[in-house]
Image: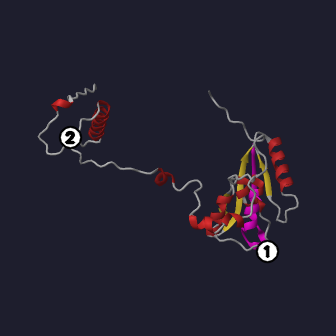
């Protein structure tokens, strides 16, 4: 689209107005005309060429929230709050994102005389472990045990996995874990607390510790096609 600007000489300006008019310089007139054309073009793109359209201004703070630091208020400066803050100007401030190992319940100590958990709590605690499933009693009303199954490459890898799990739980004050190798390439583990008549939070803590055992070199390798 070509923009044509035409300017009338100062002598041809209208003189019928009662107010005194001064001729504008050519550069100022060109700027005003180009600005008016730009405004009309934006209104056409917005679907309103009659000037009734409204432009909505959205501040970036509304989209991103209140981010970053701010300048202190005058009342804060007068209170000399900076002199009362303990710290060092050379301190390195970093935002540390918690990892899965920090959020895991494997770090929790086993609770002595832990009470059995109900079905609702057992299902909620199941989100704290990886790969385990809840086994209920015959009436499907009470959690009975936790079970996890690993697929390994062969029997030697299965026995190695069982040895690693036993080593990870060495010294844990918990009933023995049921670990079985099932031919041809499967290892099954089951957790429960017989003295409590079912599951306790300790079973989930032990399950989380088993989750930290390295198994990547024992499981079958997945074939990836290019």
Can the viewer see residue 167 in this picture?
yes
Crowding near the residue tagged with mark 1, few <14, some 14–19, many ≥20 C-alpha atoms within 10 Å? few
Image quarter of the N terminus: top left
Circle number at residue 64: none
Q: Which residue is mark 2?
A: 21
Q: Residue furthest right?
A: 171
Q: Which residue is mark 1?
A: 113
- Of the image marks 2 and 1, the number of the one nearer the N terminus: 2
Magenta-colored span: 184-208
Q: Label 2 vs label 1: CA separation? A: 97 Å
Judge from the rendering whether residue 26 lies leftward or rightward of residue 81; answer left or right.
left
Judge from the rendering whether residue 84 lies leftward or rightward of residue 32; answer left or right.
right
Image quarter of the C terminus: top right
Where is residue 118 shown, x and y percent of the image? 65, 71
Tally of marks? 2
Where is residue 158 shown, x and y percent of the image? 80, 45
In the rendered image, the vertical position of residue 7 relative to residue 140, given as above or below: above
Judge from the rendering whether residue 13 lies leftward or rightward of residue 5; answer left or right.
left
Where is residue 160 shown, x and y percent of the image? 84, 45
Q: Secondary structure at mark 1?
A: loop
136, 107: nearer the viewer: 107
Say if the magenta span includes residue 200. Answer: yes
Crowding near the residue tagged with mark 2, few <14, some 14–19, many ≥20 C-alpha atoms within 10 Å? few
Can the viewer see residue 140 in this picture?
no
1, 95: nearer the viewer: 1
The residue sitting at 81% across, 47% down in the picture is: 161
The residue sitting at 57% across, 64% down in the picture is: 74
Mark 2 against mark 1, which lies toward the viewer? 2
| Coloring scheme used | secondary structure
Q: Secondary structure at mark 2?
A: loop
């Amino acid at each position: 689209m070509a923009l044509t600007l035409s300017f009338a000489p100062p002598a041809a300006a209208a003189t019928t107005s009662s107010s005194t008019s001064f001729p504008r310089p050519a550069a100022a007139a060109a700027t005003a005309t180009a600005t008016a054309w730009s405004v009309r073009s934006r209104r056409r793109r917005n679907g309103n060429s009659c000037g009734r359209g409204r432009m909505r201004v959205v501040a970036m703070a509304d989209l991103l929230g209140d981010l970053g630091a701010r300048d202190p208020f005058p009342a804060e400066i007068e209170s000399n709050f900076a002199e009362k803050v303990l710290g060092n100007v050379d301190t390195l401030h970093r935002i540390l994102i918690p990892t899965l190992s920090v959020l895991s319940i494997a770090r929790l100590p086993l609770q002595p005389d832990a009470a059995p958990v109900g079905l609702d709590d057992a299902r909620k605690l199941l989100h704290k472990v990886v790969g385990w499933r809840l086994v209920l009693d015959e009436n499907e009303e009470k959690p009975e045990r936790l079970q996890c199954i690993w697929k390994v490459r062969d029997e030697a890898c299965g026995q190695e996995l069982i040895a690693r799990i036993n080593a990870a739980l060495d010294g844990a004050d918990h009933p023995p874990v049921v670990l079985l190798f099932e031919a041809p390439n499967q290892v099954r583990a089951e957790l429960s607390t017989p003295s409590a008549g079912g599951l306790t939070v300790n079973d989930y803590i032990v399950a989380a510790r088993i989750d930290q055992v390295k198994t990547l070199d024992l499981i079958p390798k997945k074939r990836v096609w290019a």
